[in-house]
Amino acid sequence: MKSPISLALALVFLMGLLTPYEAGAQQTNADGVFYIIQSGDTLSTIASRFGLTVDQIVAANDLINPDQISAGTQIKLPGVDWVRGVLDTRLVNFGETMRTLSRRYEVTFPTFSRLNGAVSPGQLFVGYPAMLPTETGEFLAGDRAVLATEETSLELTAAAGMNVWMVAGQNRVAGTARMLAGDVLILPGTTGTGPGALPSPISRLSLEPLPLVQGKTTVIRASAAGEPLTLSGALVDRPLTFYTQDIGELVALQGVHAMLPTGLYPFAIEGTLADGSGFSYSQLIAVQSGGYESESLTVDVDYLDDPQSQSENEFVAEVIAPHSLIKLWDGFFVLPTPYGDTINSYFGTRRSYNDSPFDYFHTGVDWGGGLGTPVLAPAHGVVVFAGELVVRGNATIIDHGWGVYTGYWHQEEILVQVGDEVVPGQTIGMVGTTGRSTGAHLHWEVWVSGVQVEPLDWLFRTYP
């Protein structure tokens, strides 16, 4: 016969595994289940998602005009008894999985899948809009602890001042023996907000924007609670370079190619913590369309994919390859021209030459203004190229640090030389029509870690 103590421990363990949402599946929440309306929702799509009718939702919420619903409003879902609380949607960030989210929000895999359209663990990519059950509409927090090699679950929970059975229940682990070395556990009743699948010193690892967007600058930030941290990684097919902003605060900038097909791509991180322990993690991330326009042009057939253009592209790629360790720009970029409202062609525009497929794109912004209009430096930087090229004409390239470069093509005159340090608003040249140009204009480009990105973004927001 089992001792009373053994029976008591077993009972405590079973109660720990019975999470609030599982318990609630057998009863109706007195206040009902609520859903926070998202942008793009209609009552029809909400009703279809939860197996209801529009009339049921209208009656339960006393809606006067069903066509006037707004994002952020809570509505009651009558008769929904397989989940509890307030249902809200958040974008999955790097280091979050179905397992970590189910642990943090105490929701079973079947319920998670039902809320999110039968998503399998492998489909939960970075940027996925996951619907989650909350108590009041606020997303839950929870500190994390990593079970070290040769450390027992009892030792870990004791060090955290917690009951091992409560930790097992919170993390949906069927027995303490199932807690294995390397497992990242959520500690119940705590307030941490870091990515659930990464070691506890990592308090933040975020990407902006989410999802990633063709032709945009991606900012990756990592924090380690004031502890030293080293990181490396790759986004899509580009290696990442991280720079230290403060102790335990790292940032990387990476452009997403404007012609990268939409879909899911790999994002991988490797790091070393202050105690010398290493970690690595990879996850798919979504890339969405930049919504660019298209145009058809007629050009001399000899200019299409000619060897001169290719060799010049390779030369420019070499110039903008180094990553200076010092960030020189500060705040917003300024306009590279006094005629900011004279844009003749926008970045990212898909181009067809001589009825070809739209396999080309405009790599910068074209500004008008006429011959002799001043060309201005948009930010603090150092000139790394100033000279004549066949395609780009009289060209200047400025290094702003951290893998950020700007380029200025087709100038009539160059007023700086390699090694010059420039400041925002300084005149660095004059607009012209040199090189392969059909009229006087300034073609302005911005590269971020070897990829051309939307230059106008750098005028209207700060990086990083």
Image (cartoon, rainbow, N blue to C red):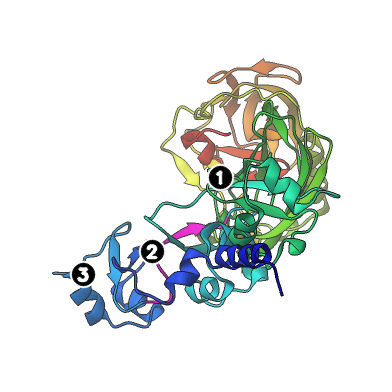
Position in image of residue 25 (x %, y %): 44, 75
Give the Cα distance between marks 2 and 3: 16 Å
Of residues 456 and 37, the one nearer the viewer is: 37
Which-is-in-front pick, marks 2 and 3? 2
In this picture, which residue range is highlighted in magenta? 81-92
Say which residue label 2 marks. Answer: 85
Tell me which amino acid carries mark 2.
Answer: Gly
Q: Which mark is residue 343?
A: none
Residue 423, image x, y percentages: 59, 17
Q: How crowded is mark 2: few (under 14 residues within 10 Å), some or many (20 or more)?
A: some
Q: Which residue is found at the position 34% from the left and 74% from the top?
A: 28
Looking at the image, is mark 1 or mark 3 earlier in the sequence?
Answer: 3
Q: Earlier in the sequence, mark 2 or mark 3?
A: 3
* Left or right: 393, with 426 as reference point: right
The mark nearer the N terminus, 2 or 1, is 2
Give the spatial CA distance, label 2 vs label 1. 20 Å
Q: Does the magenta stretch include residue 84?
A: yes
Q: Mark 1 = which residue?
A: 193
- Answer with the quarter of the image where residue 431 lies: top right
Amino acid marked by disc 3:
Asn
- Residues at marks 1 and 3, CA–CA distance in whole angstroms: 33 Å
